[in-house]
Amino acid sequence: MTRSFLRDDDLSPVELAEVLDLAAAMKADPYGRVDPSFRALAGPRTVAIIFDKPTLRTQASFVAGVAELGGNPMVVDGNLAQIGTRESIADVARVLGRQASLIVWRTHDQSRIDEMAAYAGVPVVNALTDQFHPCQTLADLLTIREHKGSTAGLTMTFLGDAACNMGHSYLLSGAAAGMHVRVSGPDGYQPDSAILDRAREIGGETGGSAEIVADPKQASEGADVLITDTWVSMGKEQESADRAEVFLPWQLNGDLLALGADDAIVLHCLPAYRGKEITAEVLDGPRSVIWDEAENRRHAQKAIMSWLLAHADPAGTDLR
C-alpha cells in the first residue's frame, strides 16, 4: 500500500523516531549520499513540487533536498495549474502520478491533499495545508533533539493562534515524540477538539500529554521549548489589525522566556514579524535556534521522502 504523509499522525511514534534518526544521519553527510530509493532503473526519480500558496523555505528546502538525494525536482506553479478549477484534483493526481515518483503539495483545505493522495498512486507529502504543517514539525523535532538530546519528557509550549495549522501539528507530533505539549491562545483561537483528543490518545501511548493552557504565563512556566508563529496565517491578512491587539499578551518576549526553563530554546517556523508575535531580542537572542530549525527543513524532508519511497517499494529499501 502506498504511504503518504498528509498529517502528523500518519506516522506512528515508532515510525516518527525512524524518520528523525534518518534525518540526523542525512544531516551528518548531506552531500555525500545519493539515496538508493531515489534511483529508479531508468535514472533519477522526479518529485513534483506544487505551490498554491507563497513559499520560500519550503521550496528552497524541497528543491535542494531532492537534488541532494539524486532526484529531479519538478516545481509546478499552482496558480498556473489551477488545480481543482481548471481540472479536477483527481485528474491532476492521475497525470502527475505517471510523471513523478512522489508529489509534494502546499495547498489550502486538507480535503484537497487527501483527494490528491487518493488518486495519485504515488506517495504524497503535505507541504502545508490550512489544517496541518507536518514537515515543519519534523524539522522542529529534529532541532529539539539536536539541542536537548531527546524529546521524551520535555515540555513544549506553543503561544499564539492555537487554532492554526502549526498548533494542530505541534499537538500531534509533540505527543508522538513523548513530549508534554501546551498550546495557549486567546478565546476563539483554540485547536480543533478532535485533534486535541487525538493528541491525548497518542500521548497515552508515549508518555506524553496535550493540553490547552489559557494563561500564556502559566503555559510558559518551566517550558523546555517555547514556540510561536505569525498571528496572521495565509489567507487571513484582512484580520491583521484586529489580531495584533487580541494576541499581544501571547507575544513571545523576554518576560515569557524568563518563565521557561533556564535552558529553554525558542523556535519559530518563519516568516517572523519582530515586534509582533516575537520580539527581536528573543528571535535574535542566544536562546533562539530558529536558523538551525530553518536548515533542518531540508534534512527532515529528505528523510520523509526517502522513507515513503522505501515503503512504497514492495521489496523495501534499508535506509539505515
Image: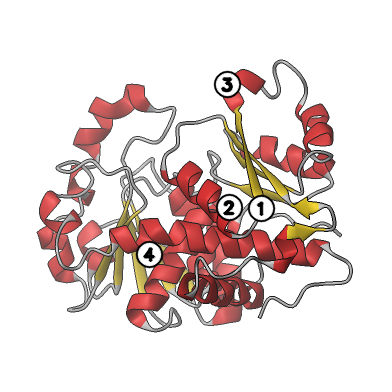
On residue 128, the disc is none
Specify the quadrant that holds the C terminus: bottom right
Q: Quadrant of residue 282?
A: bottom left
Total labels drawn: 4
Q: CA distance from mark 1 to mark 3?
A: 24 Å
Residue 41 rendering spot, x and y as whole percentages: 85, 58
Q: Bin the neighbour count of mark 1 within 10 Å (Cα to Cα): few under 14, some 14-19, many 20 and up.
A: many
Q: Are marks 3 and 4 in contact (CB under 8 Å)?
A: no
Element marked by disc 1:
loop
Q: CA distance from mark 4 to mark 1?
A: 38 Å
Residue found at the very far top of the displayed protein: 86
Q: Earlier in the sequence, mark 2 or mark 3?
A: 2
Instruction: Tell me if residue 16 can be seen.
Output: yes
**Placement of 145 over or under 294, stated as above or below:** below
Q: Are marks 2 and 1 in contact (CB under 8 Å)?
A: yes
**Placement of 21 over or under 140, stated as above or below:** below
Depth check, front residue: 318 or 176: 318
Q: CA distance from mark 2 to mark 1?
A: 5 Å
The residue indicated by pointer 4 is: 182
The residue indicated by pointer 1 is: 71
On residue 67, the disc is 2
Q: Earlier in the sequence, mark 1 or mark 3?
A: 1
- Name the residue: 81% across, 61% down: 312
The residue indicated by pointer 3 is: 79
Q: CA distance from mark 3 to mark 4?
A: 36 Å
Residue 71 rendering spot, x and y as whole percentages: 66, 53
Q: Bin the neighbour count of mark 3 within 10 Å (Cα to Cα): few under 14, some 14-19, many 20 and up.
A: few
